[in-house]
Amino acid sequence: MPDKEKMQEVQYGIFSWGPCIVHIRISEDFHKLLMEEAKASRVKELDYTKKLAGVIKEEYMFRKKEMFLPWVSQCLGIYDEAFQKHKNVYYKPEDKPNYLLSSLWVNFMKKNEFNPPHDHSDALSFVIFLDVPPEITKEQEDYIGNSGGPGSLGFLYGEGNRQAITYQSIKPKNRDMFIFPAWVKHYVAPFYSDVTRISVSGNVANSVELKDMEKYNAAKKQYAGPKG
């Protein structure tokens, strides 16, 4: 039998594996601005459904996504810090990614609508939940099963080996933001209450084409946002 004292001296470590997905609680100010502009985009009927995978009737492009750059910039800074810890590799200042908010839209999701498993273009994607009605929360509490249940957000990665974590299911709440690599497959399950859930989605590129450089630099200068 091994000596117990020697067993206590054994050191171990765990390797990070799989994609880096970060959960952030956005500020009330950011939430308020997103909600105001989401409703304004809906009034303007800036339809975005033809560019998206969701079986959702009301999806609208934001009128001026540049106004959100200070907040998005701060959240991406948090993601960068988390990603470096996740990978255990730290950037040199000159190697820090330059991000471009390439698209931003709002989803007004109703009963029986859903988003099938899909991925996005660009480097990173994110989703922010603005209004999750209590009826959906009640559906999730009453749900009996092994998945996330009605209205859940799911992430899929890998080959589904039961000895590995290849699936994450989340029951989102108001002001929840999730940032993840755009190539990660994800989906949103339907709910069945006669309510509307409002969420915002966006894509972020980590390189800027030459034709967009002047426009990007002007936006970055005007909406520098918090650093860190």
Image (cartoon, rainbow, N blue to C red):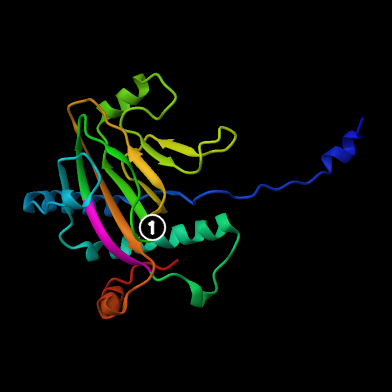
Quadrant (top left, top right, bottom left, bottom right) of the N terminus: top right
Element type at mark 1: strand
Q: Is residue 112 above or below residue 37?
A: above
- Residue depicted at 17% across the width and 55% down the height: 61
In the foreground, 76 or 60: 60
In the foreground, 199 or 147: 147
Coordinates of residue 37 in the picture (x, y in percent) = 17, 54
Say whether residue 203 is left or right of residue 59: right
Magenta residue check for 103: yes
Range shown magenta: 99-105
- Residue depicted at 26% across the width and 36% down the height: 114
> Which residue bears the numbered disc 1?
124
- Residue depicted at 36% across the width and 27% down the height: 149
Residue found farthest to the front: 159
Q: Amino acid at mark 1?
A: Leu
In the foreground, 200 or 68: 200
Determine the image quadrant of residue 181: bottom left
Say whether residue 134 is left or right of residue 141: left
Q: Is residue 56 above or below residue 227?
A: above
